[in-house]
Image (cartoon, grey):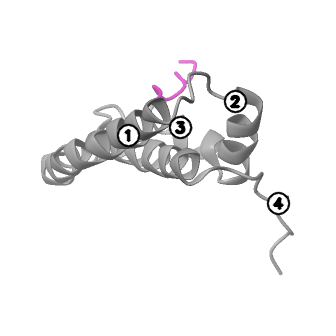
Amino acid sequence: MLPELPPLPALTRAEGDLVDAYLEAVDLLGRINPARGHDTYSGLRAAQALVGKAVALRDALALMHDRGESALHTATLDRALRVLDGERRAERVTLPSVSPR
């Protein structure tokens, strides 16, 4: 049985779109990461999809800005990213640890 996750904090639709698009972009960057990738084709496909995610990120932030939301509620967004496994997902973007020789 899976452990019960903490509840997702209340987000506006634009904040939810921002978090979703950000995590999707992070996932794609993890697939593109040459230190972790396996083949050029999957990296190419991820890079092509990243363009669409960048547009989604821009649109979510533009909507928030247009609504007068000038500040990000970082504590709330941080909680949302953690509930959605953002730490593990972002780990794939970094370089792998160097094992001692």
Q: Are marks 4 and 3 in contact (CB under 8 Å)?
A: no
First of labels 4, 1 by sequence position: 4
Q: Nearer the viewer, residue 6 or 76?
A: 76
Q: Is residue 3 left or right of residue 20?
A: right
Name which residue lies at 53% across and 37% down: 90
**Tag 4 secondary structure:** loop
Which part of the image, by quadrant, shows the N terminus?
Answer: bottom right
The amino acid pointed to by label 1 is Leu
Q: Residue 3 location in percent, x, y? A: 85, 69
Q: Which residues are magenta?
A: 94-101
Name which residue lies at 43% across and 48% down: 21
- Residue picked out by circle 3: 90
**Tag 1 secondary structure:** helix
- Residue picked out by circle 1: 57
99 is within the stretch colored magenta: yes
Type of secondary structure dominating the magenta stretch: loop
Say few, some or many: other residues with alpha carbon within 10 Å of mark 1 (under 14 / 14 to 19 / 20 or more): many
Tag nearer the camera, 4 or 3: 4
